[in-house]
Each structure stands twice: as structure tokens, then as C-alpha cells.
Image (spheres, rainbow, N blue to C red):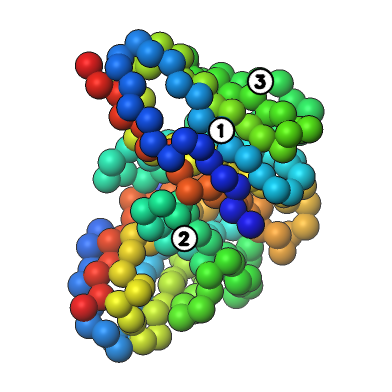
Amino acid sequence: QQPVQSPQAVILREGEDAVINCSSSKALYSVHWYRQKHGEAPVFLMILLKGGEQKGHDKISASFNEKKQQSSLYLTASQLSYSGTYFCGTGGRGGMIKAAGNKLTFGGGTRVLVKP
Amino acid sequence: DVKVTQSSRYLVKRTGEKVFLECVQDMDHENMFWYRQDPGLGLRLIYFSYDVKMKEKGDIPEGYSVSREKKERFSLILESASTNQTSMYLCATSGSSETQYFGPGTRLLVL
């Protein structure tokens, strides 16, 4: 079952902050965040593992709440380059079973537009 | 850097045609994936492969098949294309970690 992302879209002015949530109905072991700019391939931003620390990538950070089965992505002091669609992907138990293929289940995406 | 290439950026096909989409990676990754991307639905997994000649169904395999004869190459086949298969198709690969590396995508239009 796909994780649910919210909001579906957000419009920001440069310098504003935003939060994107990713909620799962199943227990989470890992959450991956990707960003896809218009016309380009999705690009990996960061991974959060169960029991791991909050991660950061420039002024984009993320947290992982095991109890709530949710991850949140924080866009701080947003820049024009942050525009794109953000996807969360939920993983399995570290891909120890080869047939699992380390597959991820992605959410529906959150479109972010940062305006000057 | 991982490089994932897809055979075409844009394709236009007629209903009923057999369509081949090809994906090639240069990083010796074991795992390869095919997704389709539709507005509001995100990335949905069609098939994946964790080894040569091995394949597993994803969440939406109906109407598709795959082939992996060599480690670096993973093909998606639409046996008889239909208009509801008009979409963006993305290939991805991963190695020992779960991090996936995506190709540029193929935008397929079925008329």
C-alpha cells in the first residue's frame, strides 16, 4: 500500500519554510526522500532508518517518527532551486532477502513551487 | 556516478502494437525496476528484477512483461499497447543499499 503524502502541493515565497509529511499504514523501517525537477529523473535526497538520527541535506532536513509511522521533510528558508516534486519511498527490512530486491513503495508526491 | 539510460525519451505507438522499452545501467547493480508515473499517483512499481533472468511482479504488472538476459539491461514489454498505458515510464537501479538511481524516463503515448 502506498504511503500517503501531504500536502499534495505547496506554493512558497523564497525564504519561507514548508513541511511535507509521509504517512504509512504499515510499520516503517526506512524512508527515502527523492526530488524530481520538471522534465528530469527523480534524484535521491536522503534516507532515514528506523532508530536513526534526523538527516539533513543543505537546508532540507527530515525526521522519522516510528510511533506515528510517519516521516516529515522540512524545507527551511526555501530557495528557487527547491521547486519540484518530492516523493517519499518506504523500504523493507534492509533488503536482506534477495528476492525483495530492495524495493521501495512511493507516495503520490508533493509538488513544491518556490516563487521569487 | 551511476548512469542509467533509457532507449527513448518519447515514443508514439498505436493501440495493439508491441512496445519495447529498454533500460541500461553501468554500475553492476543487482536490482532493476520499472515504474510508471502518472499525475497524483506518484511512482508505481510494475516489475523488478534482483538478478539475471529473475523477475518479480510489482504493484501493477497487468499488461506488461519484462526481460533481463544480461545484468546491465532490463526491458519492459507491452505485448499489445492500450491507450491506458499512456504514461511516463521510469527505470531505476539499486545495488546493496535501497537507494535507487533513476533513468531520464520515456514518455509513451498510445493512440
Q: Which mark is residue A54?
A: 3
Chain at tag 3: A
> Could you give the CA–CA distance between mark 2 and mark 3, rounded to whole angstroms?
28 Å
Of the numbered discs in the image, which one, if any, rests on residue B35? 2
Separation of residues labelled 1 and 3 (CA atoms)? 14 Å
Q: Nearer the viewer, mark 1 or mark 3?
A: 1
Task: Describe the element under mark 3 as helix, strand or loop.
Answer: loop
Where in the figure is residue A21, as x and y percent of width and height?
56, 33
**What amino acid type should be assigned to the residue bearing mark 1?**
Asn
The subunit letter for the residue under badge 2 reads: B
Secondary structure, mark 1, is strand
Q: Position of residue B70 (x, y in %)?
A: 52, 69
Q: Amino acid at mark 2?
A: Tyr
Residue found at x 60% / y 71%: B57
Q: Amino acid at mark 3?
A: Gln
Report if the CB atoms under discs 1 and 3 are less than 8 Å apart: no
Q: Residue at x 30, y 24 (%)?
A: A114
What residue did someone put label 1 on? A21
